Amino acid sequence: MAALHLAFALALFTGHAAGVNNGLARTPQMGWNNWNALGCDVSESLLLDTSKKLVDSGLRDVGYNYVVLDDCWSRGRDEEGFLEEDLEKFPSGMSAVAEELHRQGLLFGMYSSAGEMTCARYAGSLDWEENDAKSFAGWGVDYLKYDNCYHMGRFGTPKLSFDRYKVMWDALNSTGRPILYSLCNWGEDYSHTWGMSIANSWRMSGDIYDSFSRPDDLCSCIDASSPFCIAPGTHCSVLNIINKVAPYVDRGQPGGWNDLDMLEVGNGGMTDEEYKAHFSLWAALKSPLLMGNDLRSLSAASLTILNNPAVIAISQDPVGHSVYRVRRELNVAKDKYGVGEIQVWSGGLSGGDQVVLLLNAAGEDARISASLEEIFLHDGPEGSAPQINEEWEVFDLWGNRMDNALAQKILDADEKDVEKLWKQANWYNSTEISYKEGLKKRDERLMGKKVGKINAGGSLTAKVKRHSVEMFRLRSVGHGGKRKVHAKEEL
Ligand SMILES: *[C@@H]1O[C@H](CO)[C@@H](O)[C@H](O)[C@H]1NC(C)=O
Ligand SMILES: *[C@@H]1O[C@H](CO)[C@@H](O)[C@H](O)[C@H]1NC(C)=O
């Protein structure tokens, strides 16, 4: 059984290595995008104020390095058919913006649509791909979010959508500039089955909105593979999106990821516990982590969610495995929308560690318990996984969440004082030491807070508040020497 499992894993590995080849997104990309908080209200000063905030708050150095400008930036095409930036919004021009971001150690992302128009009805890139890829490369762009509006009916089969999106992938490639390609077709035409061949990430759902569990008619699809899912829409809750991606979590691999859409942390519609759960799930499911808030008014509470290095280390683990859902209980205690679910998610990390999420998406606090047999289901069903016979140390990944008062001081500090505060906060600096290196050295900031042990054959139990998550790293004591960590996975 174990040998078969390994053979299968290796076959998958080789298959996907042949897919994307631009060297980018070896771990899920991190950064910021203006859309969720600001929509079309974009400008050069927004991007530069935001980039300054990314640097001054320390967020760049925990890994958020892409600044992505969404829709509404152009004023149409010039006589030669090249897109022109709106010089009222971007008076110095896009090249100057890119240069300034690069000077700050950041990368620059832009947006277009594989349609005749973008979603906000600006000029789209369909049938103009070569020109537009040249413009992006010429401006010094490092990332393209490529949307799906006004596609002229060129969708409805996987092949139609694949072909339409491949044109831009090829055009970007022929510029010679490595540009992260973020495919945004909302999961239409089963993008989770072909996205990995031509993109560094692919959206698998309609747009997120700032609610944890509220069902909405505009997000009519609950199953991305249903033939009736023809309007992925908008207003998709956190719970809707994770339930949709659950059957496809294994499609992400180093180089290409399921994109669960931008984060809502800090936008005001969810409680602190809900935002913690949202962020934890996005990290563990290997979604890109693009903050979608207005960083100019970042709160201390939001900062201490977004900067948690123990959770980010799950997202940036070099093995690149998403967690799987190993249990879903429905109709527990219903919340005000009639939703009441308990879920357990579990996945393998580098060095043979395991991450476990106990999710309470019900209307009341709950005690949730998961046995080692359940936790290691994907290493062998029905109790056949060797890990069940090992002893495990348990680390709470939210146990060392930064104190709000210190976070507020960091946000208020001026440039000359902030370094002292970073030191005091023991800030994880991934610019100096990558997550891969930090994990190899078992940097304590990435491990979380040790809270207990699980004996061989035992289980993990925690009290979980309503609409919240508890998230743990499990580390085998002594590793038993019985189990080999797959060498191939240590990339
Ligand atoms: C992280 O390291 C870089 C490079 O040494 C440095 O410029 C930056 O100020 C550091 N940031 C933090 C948050 O410590
Ligand atoms: C273009 O594609 C080739 C192989 O298909 C790859 O080796 C190369 O790195 C790509 N270049 C860029 C800039 O994406």
Image (cartoon, rainbow, N blue to C red):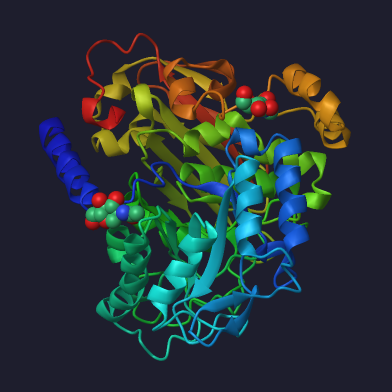
Q: Nearer the viewer, residue 446 or 223?
A: 446
Q: Viewer-proximal residue, 435 or 84?
A: 84
Q: Is 129 on the left or on the right of 10, as rendered?
A: right
Q: Quadrant of the N terminus?
A: top left
> Height in image: 81 above or below 300?
below
| Residue 15: % across, % down | 18, 50
**Left or right of 399 on screen, residue 4:** left
Q: Is residue 341 above or below residue 410?
A: below
**Image position, residue 107 (x, y; %):** 56, 48
Q: Nearer the viewer, residue 159 or 481?
A: 159
- Quadrant for ligand 1 reads top right
Question: Picture coordinates of residue 301 (x, y %)?
Answer: 78, 40
* Quarter where residue 386 is shown: top left
Q: Residue at x 27, y 31 (%)?
A: 489
Task: Tally the marks.
Answer: 0
The residue positioned farthest toward the front in the image shown:
80
Q: Residue reaching furthest bottom?
A: 152
Left or right: 329 in relation to 216: left
Displayed quadrant of residue 226? bottom left
Classify residue 112 as left or right of residue 412: left
Q: Vertically, is 228 above or below 369?
A: below
Q: Residue at x 34, y 23 (%)?
A: 352
* Residue that appears at 79% across and 47% down: 298
Quarter of the image for residue 264 reads bottom right
In the image, what residue occupies the spot 48% across and 84% down? 81
* Residue 361 visible in the displayed image: no
Residue 345 seen by the camera: yes
Q: Name the quadrant of the C terminus.
A: top left
Residue 75 position in % (x across, y down): 64, 81
